[in-house]
Image: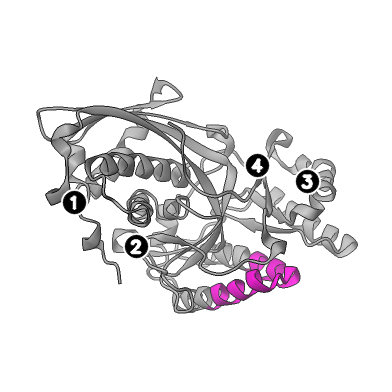
């Protein structure tokens, strides 16, 4: 079994003295959890396992330029869309501080980080998962320069491990279209330390699954996910919820293998509502859904009952709605979204997306 110690940089085989400067550009996608992770332990360890669909169009593209320096320490400049972004720096500083024990070589370089999102920054889509995944891939690309004998499987495992230290869900944005993060007895190779590509065959019904993101609220959440996770520590229903997540992940694994769309719809929507039920029953309690979120949910239920089209919703820790459906019914569902659901979005704004395959080296 892999443990955190296995990811400490191998200084014996490093060639650090020969790498003076360079640049990489990686893209990494966002992801949407179907079985939700809510609640975490120390060092970004999840309180329960999760399973997510990797997205394709909503991604972060990050260029990392590195130059060797004489003084030791964490030094970096941060640009967002080519312009300095000081308010983003504390999160990157914290990320670097967390990964230094595993990547001590970062203290030997000055970094210039230039990052951009393919989706509007103000769209209400959390960019922490895609952003930290892209950062982790760049750092690992540098590490592979310093340790050329690195195996591909180790490269991706450690990238996911590092991404998790920046943002828990970021570890699900490294590789694969369906990713499991968290120890789960019936998922071979699953780990609390990193995400893995689902190690089982997936039915044709779930290939190239579609996700349209309805932007109900583009503003900043009144309660951050970090605070929400912390409120699970003394939550009256936490133990049962963690047990339920394991059960639902096992059930979803079977659904994805058999292609049962009706069961998929039921489980995914139940998971989404359970996540928000945990928020509404914590102390202090809070509600992230908006009235338009509920309007959309009710419209989806009515449309599904009328047409028998297996379209469903899921929610992240916010008001926006992810509309999930098979590629075979894309035209019917998009027409429904344009005519019935877009009116509940800010400026009728929604983003068409679909399943993707993880992070990609651009140059």
Q: Residues within 10 Å of mark 2 (few under 14, many from 20)?
A: many
Q: Nearer the viewer, residue 265 or 152?
A: 152
Q: Residue at coordinates 70% horizontally, 63% vertically from top-left?
A: 204
- The reply, left or right, for residue 101 in relation to residue 346 is left
Asked if 78 appears above or below 41 in the picture, the reply is above
Quadrant placement of the N terminus: bottom left
Give the labeled residue for mark 3.
341
Q: Earlier in the sequence, mark 3 or mark 1?
A: 1
Give the labeled residue for mark 4.
215
Question: Where residue 234 sits in the image (x, y, percent)?
Answer: 39, 71
Give the labeled residue for mark 2.
193
Q: Earlier in the sequence, mark 2 or mark 1?
A: 1
Task: Work out how far the residue at label 4 is from the one at label 2, CA to CA, in angstroms.
Answer: 31 Å
Task: Work out how far the residue at label 3 is from the one at label 2, CA to CA, in angstroms.
Answer: 38 Å
Task: Work out how far the residue at label 3 is from the one at label 4, CA to CA, in angstroms.
Answer: 10 Å
Q: Residue at coordinates 55% horizontally, 72% vertically from top-left?
A: 249
| Residue 248 covered by magenta stretch | yes
Q: Earlier in the sequence, mark 3 or mark 4?
A: 4
Q: Earlier in the sequence, mark 3 or mark 2?
A: 2
Q: Residue at coordinates 46% horizontally, 24% vertically from top-left?
A: 81
Magenta-colored span = 247-270
Residue sitting farthest toward the right? 306
Asked if 218 appears above or below 52 in the picture, the reply is above
């Amino acid at each position: 079994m892999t443990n955190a110690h296995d990811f400490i940089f191998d200084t014996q085989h490093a060639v650090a003295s020969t790498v003076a400067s360079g640049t990489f550009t990686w893209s990494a996608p966002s992801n949407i959890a179907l079985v939700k992770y809510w609640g975490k332990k120390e060092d970004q360890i999840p309180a329960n396992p999760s399973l997510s669909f990797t997205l394709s169009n909503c991604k972060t593209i990050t260029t990392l330029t590195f130059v060797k320096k004489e003084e030791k320490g964490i030094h970096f400049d941060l640009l967002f869309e080519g312009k300095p972004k000081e308010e983003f720096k504390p999160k990157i500083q914290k990320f670097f501080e967390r990964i230094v024990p595993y990547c001590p070589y970062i203290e030997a370089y000055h970094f210039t980080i230039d990052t951009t999102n393919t989706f509007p920054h103000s769209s209400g889509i959390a960019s922490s998962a895609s952003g930290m995944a892209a950062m982790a891939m760049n750092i690992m690309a540098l590490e592979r320069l310093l340790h050329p004998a690195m195996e591909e499987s180790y490269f991706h495992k450690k990238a996911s491990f590092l991404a998790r230290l920046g943002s828990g869900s970021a570890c699900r944005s490294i590789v694969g279209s369906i990713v499991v993060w968290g120890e789960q007895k019936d998922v071979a190779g699953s780990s609390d330390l990193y995400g893995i590509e689902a190690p089982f065959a997936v039915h044709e019904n779930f290939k190239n699954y579609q996700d349209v993101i309805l932007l109900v609220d583009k503003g900043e959440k009144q309660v951050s996910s970090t605070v929400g996770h912390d409120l699970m520590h003394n939550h009256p229903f936490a133990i049962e919820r963690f047990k339920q997540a394991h059960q639902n992940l096992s059930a979803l694994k079977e659904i994805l293998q058999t292609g049962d769309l009706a069961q998929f719809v039921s489980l995914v929507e139940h998971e989404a509502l359970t996540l928000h039920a945990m928020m509404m029953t914590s102390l202090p309690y809070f509600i992230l859904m908006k009235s338009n979120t509920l309007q959309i949910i009710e419209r989806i239920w009515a449309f599904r009952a009328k047409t028998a089209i297996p379209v469903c919703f899921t929610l992240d820790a916010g008001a926006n709605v992810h509309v999930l459906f098979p590629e075979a019914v894309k035209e019917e569902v998009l027409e429904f979204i344009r005519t019935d659901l877009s009116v509940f979005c800010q400026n009728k704004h929604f983003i068409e997306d679909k399943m993707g395959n993880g992070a990609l080296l651009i140059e």
